[in-house]
Image (cartoon, rainbow, N blue to C red):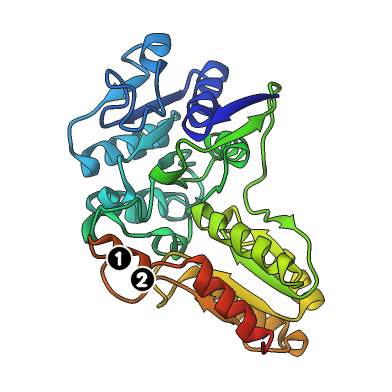
Amino acid sequence: MVEKQFREVIRDAMSEEMRRDPKVFLMGEEVGQYNGAYKASQGMLDEFGPERVLDTPISELGFAGLGVGAAMNGLRPIIEFMTFNFSLVAIDQIINSAAKLRSMSGGQFDIPIVFRGPTGNAGQLAAQHSQNFENWYANTPGLKVVVPSNPYDAKGLLKSSIRDNDPVIFMESELMYGDRAMIPEDEYLLPIGVADIKKEGNDVTLVSFGKTMKIVYEAATQLEKEGISAEVIDLRTVRPIDYETIVNSVKKTNRLVVIEEAWPLSSISTEISHHIQKEAFDYLDAPVKRVNAMDVPLAYAPTLVEASLPNVKRTLEAVKSVLYL
């Protein structure tokens, strides 16, 4: 085992897959000479050269389309967006091309492409650079959407994503790139679509994904001090969602709180709430509670950011509400 930062395991996963398969290549803004906007591709240009680590113009629509065409022709592109906020100018290529070509071609085309980069709030970046699009892309048949919460999961899930024959949206966070974890020196992969029970408990189920898991862990620790046993589930992927793990947990705890940074309307937490009332209604001892961002564009002021986003205080309040405390 060796301690690695999140940004380092992203680089390691991409590099290992590029050494394994010459069809894999990386393309995006500043991924080469600058070593990546967040240094997640540091050293890769030196190892693989400019034919496999391609710096692009500031034209997400253009290089996303190039990636889709390359995937149609047998290559396995990794497309880095400096932020998924910028993916909106490429969303036609992602949704109308990458996600649909297998179906539209009657299965004649695999589209083995990974679109990766940071999502969500990362401090004082204001309304246009702080949005969550996990639920947008998860709404699209043909895409898989992966949102890891820690370096160990990120490496195993990214390697699986690169090997997948379907297009994968792989969402990270600027606020996680410096996170550290012990990583096996031997190769490992993690399956897409399988949630992980990070902590077992009996009184309430807490479900989240991505960097919001940090809030959940802190809340669960505080609840433990108050004698409340929370089961903590990290979804890891939001398309497909591992409903079975959530349902089985709710059957045990009888209460559910879903914590998610996205806006409340049509969110992942909305979908989970619907599924639980359909599949585990008789086991619920309280209505499902959600903790989401406030339904407003995110401000620049730190006080307003804190007031808008999910936090430990709001999570604890939701848990005590379902426990009728």
Between the C-alphas of marks 2 and 1, the distance is 6 Å
Residue 143 spot, x, y in % from top left: 47, 54
Q: Is residue 85 left or right of residue 266?
A: left
Residue 266 spot, x, y in % from top left: 43, 75
When the figure is inspected, residue 80 is found, relative to residue 191, above or below; the finding is above
Q: Amino acid at mark 1?
A: Thr
The residue that disc 1 covers is 303
Neighbourhood count class around disc 1 (C-alpha, 10 Å): few under 14, some 14–19, many 20 upward: few
Between 265 and 5, the residue placed more toward the observer is: 5
Q: SS of the residue at dot 2?
A: helix
When the figure is inspected, residue 182 is found, relative to residue 105, above or below; the finding is above
Residue 224 spot, x, y in % from top left: 73, 66
The answer to whether the residues at label 2 and label 1 have Cβ atoms under 8 Å apart is yes
Quadrant in the rendering for residue 65: top left
Give the residue displayed 62% in from the left and 41% down from the top.
153
The residue that disc 2 covers is 307
Q: Amino acid at mark 2?
A: Ala
Instruction: State which quarter of the image contains the N terminus.
Output: top right
